[in-house]
Image (cartoon, rainbow, N blue to C red):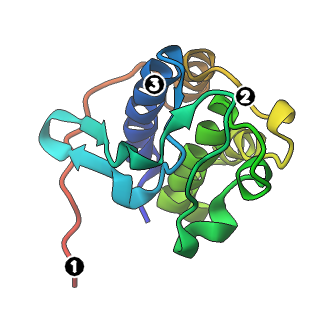
Amino acid sequence: MGAPPDAAWMWRRLLTALGWAHRAGLVHGAVFPEHVLIQPELHGLVLVDWCYATAVGTDVPVLIHHHADDYPPEARQHQPASPATDIHLASLCVRRLVGPHAPGPMRAFLRGCTLPGQNSRPQDAWQLLAELDDLLDRLYGPRIFRPFTMPTAN
C-alpha cells in the first residue's frame, strides 16, 4: 500500500496520459498496474501495452482474463467504450495503491470514478484532473515535490 500523497502524483500523471489518448480518439482499454510504468526519481509515468486500445465508441477488443472482474460493465458487455472506461480502470489502480489509507474525501472521489454506469462516471480526464487538483489542494495544501523511492520486497 502506498501513501496517498505518493499515489496522487501517479494518478495525476495517469490522467494526463489518458487525457492525451482520449483527445486522439483512443481508449487504452487495459489500464492495469502492469501497464503503468513509474520512473520514481523524476515522478514520471508511462502507460504501456496499447494492443488493447480501441477507438472511442467501439468495444474493447480483448479483455484480460485475470482482470475480468476489474473491467467496467460496458467492457464486459462489449458495449462501446469511452474515456469513462479508462477512468474507471485507472481509478481502480489508484484505489488499490492507497488502500484503506486514503482520506475519506479521496475514497469518495475514487468511488465516483468507478460507478457502474458509464454515463454516471467522469467522461473527461482533463476535467477530472482539475477536480483532483482541487481535492488534493484541500487535503494537502499547495503541491510540493516529494521524493519517492520504490519500496523493496521483503
Q: Which residue is mark 1?
A: 153
Q: Residue at x 48, y 48 (%)?
A: 31
The crowd level at tag 2 (other Cα within 10 Å; few <14, some 14-19, many 20+) is some
Give the left or right position of residue 142, taking residue 125 as reference.
Answer: left
Counting residues from the start of the chain, the first of labels 2 and 1 encountered is: 2
Q: Secondary structure at mark 1?
A: loop
Q: Which residue is mark 2?
A: 122
Between 138 and 108, the residue placed more toward the observer is 108
Q: Residue at x 38, y 40 (%)?
A: 10
Above/below status of 52 relative to 109: below
Q: Residue at x 68, y 48 (%)?
A: 107
Q: Residue at x 13, y 41 (%)?
A: 41
Residue 60 location in percent, x, y? 61, 46
Contact (Cβ within 8 Å) of mark 3 with mark 1: no
The crowd level at tag 3 (other Cα within 10 Å; few <14, some 14-19, many 20+) is some
Q: Amino acid at mark 1?
A: Ala
Q: Which residue is mark 3?
A: 21
Looking at the rendered image, the quarter that the N terminus falls into is: bottom left
Between 3 and 72, the residue placed more toward the observer is 72
Q: CA distance from mark 2 to mark 3?
A: 15 Å
Q: Amino acid at mark 3?
A: Ala
